[in-house]
Image: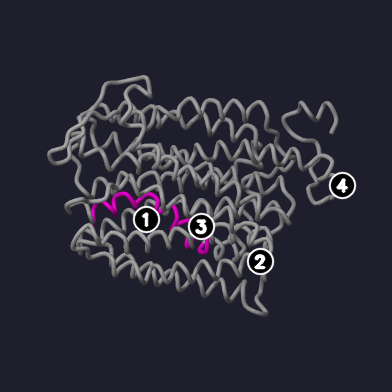
């Protein structure tokens, strides 16, 4: 690589499929890009899901919010994330990796600072909270530009692994924020700003600094944005909005979108709803489980499964692994409704294991579907399809939140929602088998 190319923001040539180029030049640039972008993607998931981690505490510090309003607050970042991903999917070929990653990471400070101040005032209106929840979706939007960028940096034989590593570690942001939140909000002045709130549950009262859950991540987002601006490059792949729109004429774009909704839609949807589901089902019992002490486990399982399933998908083929993931999701979706009528806190264990199964198989499928896409489409189209499928699947928290909320309001639990989910999983499994996994499939991958 020449001195001019070392300092230029856009690489003059990029040929990852050329073995000599990859070993002498490409490998180092690709892996450096992966690690910086993955750090920023983790922060993006933190900003996206911090609302779901904190919203369960709002009634305990004096906010007068109904169960339906709480589900809507947890769902709103999913609505904005899906919409913003539809924009993000076009950004890399237009602006390049360096600008997109740096600027989109810096924008995360807006909802984080906004929420940090809003939770300190219990008179903050539900309308303002909804706006801030919508802005939290800025973090969810980043996925649909960060991941297509990574697919351009790596050769096809390594894309399953690279995409699984980036997405899996990025998904850990969900688990990190749900694990850190209950601990960090109990410490005074970690965020450096604001007075404490009074947490009340039954006869228990204690001071709480809920703003810490948001302020903690602001300096890390600034650091991530600076690192991206200084150290990232952009590959010489350019395409206009119109040129990139050719993916919508391909039927496999729509089939792979359905499969990624089955996997990542389930992961993101249940990640956002898990704390509220625990609280809604078991919160009224004596010795009820604390939602935030368990909520992080599901995303942790799903994220780890995604990382581990990437290399397996490279070896066995994405479609075969997606079949395993789909059948596993179906089995768990059939089992969980039997756990939705608890009579005491002792009934929590079966529910927890059923939900962890959903997280496990959704994580496996997250990796395998992203192995399938680069095998079905040429590089530039694959980048766009990855962005689009990720955009639609990001609506998971919104649709899961709304549908679970409707199910709970009509029947008192989410059994009706899981019955519908079972039918959706069956359809997805059939499509994957027919077009990609069976002998003689149209696009074996």
Q: Disc 3 on helix, strand or loop?
A: helix
**Residues under numbered marks 3 and 4 in contact, where contact means CB atoms less than 8 Å apart:** no
Q: According to the image, label 1 marks what residue?
A: 399
Q: According to the image, label 3 marks what residue?
A: 363
Residue at 64 percent across and 56 percent down: it is 246
Based on the picture, tell me whether residue 103 belongs to the magenta stretch.
no
Residue 407 place in picture, x, y as percent: 26, 62
- What is the magenta segment's predominant secondary structure? helix
Q: For marks 2 and 4, give the CA distance.
A: 26 Å
Q: Residue most toward the left?
A: 203
Residue 120 place in picture, x, y as percent: 26, 27
- Answer left or right for 442 relative to 185: right
Q: According to the image, label 2 marks what residue?
A: 317
- Answer left or right for 236 relative to 230: right
Colour basis: one colour
What stretch of residues is rendered in magenta? 258-281
- Answer left or right for 241 relative to 122: right
Q: Quadrant of residue 282?
A: bottom left
Q: For marks 2 and 1, give the CA distance.
A: 30 Å
Q: Nearer the viewer, residue 64 or 337?
A: 337
Q: Quadrant of residue 4?
A: top right
Of labels 4 and 1, earlier in sequence is 4
Q: Nearer the viewer, residue 210 or 221?
A: 210
Q: For marks 1 and 3, give the CA distance.
A: 19 Å
**Residues under numbered marks 3 and 2 in contact, where contact means CB atoms less than 8 Å apart:** no
Based on the picture, tell me whether residue 271 belongs to the magenta stretch.
yes
- Bin the neighbour count of mark 4 within 10 Å (Cα to Cα): few under 14, some 14-19, many 20 and up: few
- Answer left or right for 81 relative to 90: left
Residue at 20 percent across and 42 percent down: it is 65
Q: According to the image, label 4 marks what residue?
A: 20
Residue 72 place in picture, x, y as percent: 29, 47
Q: Quadrant of residue 350?
A: bottom left
């Amino acid at each position: 690589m020449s001195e001019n190319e070392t300092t230029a923001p856009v690489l003059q040539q990029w040929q990852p499929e050329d073995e000599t180029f990859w070993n002498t030049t490409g490998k180092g640039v690709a892996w450096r890009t992966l690690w910086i972008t993955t750090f920023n993607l983790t922060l993006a998931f933190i900003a996206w899901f911090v609302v779901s981690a904190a919203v369960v505490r709002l009634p305990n510090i004096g906010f007068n919010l109904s169960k339906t309003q709480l589900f809507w607050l947890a769902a709103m970042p999913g609505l904005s994330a899906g919409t913003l991903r539809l924009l993000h999917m076009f950004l890399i070929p237009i602006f390049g990796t360096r600008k997109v990653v740096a600027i989109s990471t810096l924008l995360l400070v807006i909802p984080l600072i906004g929420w940090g101040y809003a939770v300190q005032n219990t008179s903050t209106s539900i309308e303002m909270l909804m706006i801030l929840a919508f802005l939290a979706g800025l973090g969810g939007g980043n996925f649909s530009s960060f991941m297509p960028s990574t697919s351009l940096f790596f050769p096809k034989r390594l894309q399953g692994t690279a995409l699984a590593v980036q997405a899996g570690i990025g998904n850990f942001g969900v688990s990190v924020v749900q694990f850190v939140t209950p601990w960090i909000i109990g410490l005074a002045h970690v965020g450096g700003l604001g007075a404490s709130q009074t947490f009340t549950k039954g006869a228990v009262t204690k001071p709480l600094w809920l703003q810490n859950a948001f302020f903690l991540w602001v300096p890390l987002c600034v650091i991530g944005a600076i690192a991206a601006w200084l150290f990232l490059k952009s590959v010489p792949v350019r395409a206009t909005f119109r040129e990139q729109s050719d993916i919508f004429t391909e039927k496999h774009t729509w089939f792979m979108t359905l499969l990624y909704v089955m996997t990542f839609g389930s992961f993101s949807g249940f990640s956002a709803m898990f704390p509220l589901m625990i609280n809604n089902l078991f919160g009224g019992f004596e010795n009820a489980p604390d939602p935030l002490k368990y909520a992080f486990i599901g995303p942790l399982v799903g994220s780890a499964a995604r990382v581990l399933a990437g290399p397996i998908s490279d070896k066995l083929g994405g479609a075969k692994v997606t079949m395993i993931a789909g059948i596993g999701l179906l089995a768990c979706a059939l089992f969980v409704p039997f756990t939705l009528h608890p009579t005491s806190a002792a009934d929590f264990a079966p529910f927890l294991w059923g939900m962890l199964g959903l997280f496990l198989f959704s994580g496996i499928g997250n990796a395998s579907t992203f192995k399938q896409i680069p095998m079905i489409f040429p590089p530039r189209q694959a980048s766009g399809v990855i962005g689009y499928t990720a955009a639609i699947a990001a609506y998971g928290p919104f649709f899961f939140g709304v549908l679970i909320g409707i199910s709970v309001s009509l029947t008192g639990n989410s059994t009706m929602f899981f019955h519908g989910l079972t039918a959706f999983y069956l359809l997805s499994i059939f499509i994957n088998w027919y077009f990609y996994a069976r002998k003689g499939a149209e696009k074996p991958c």
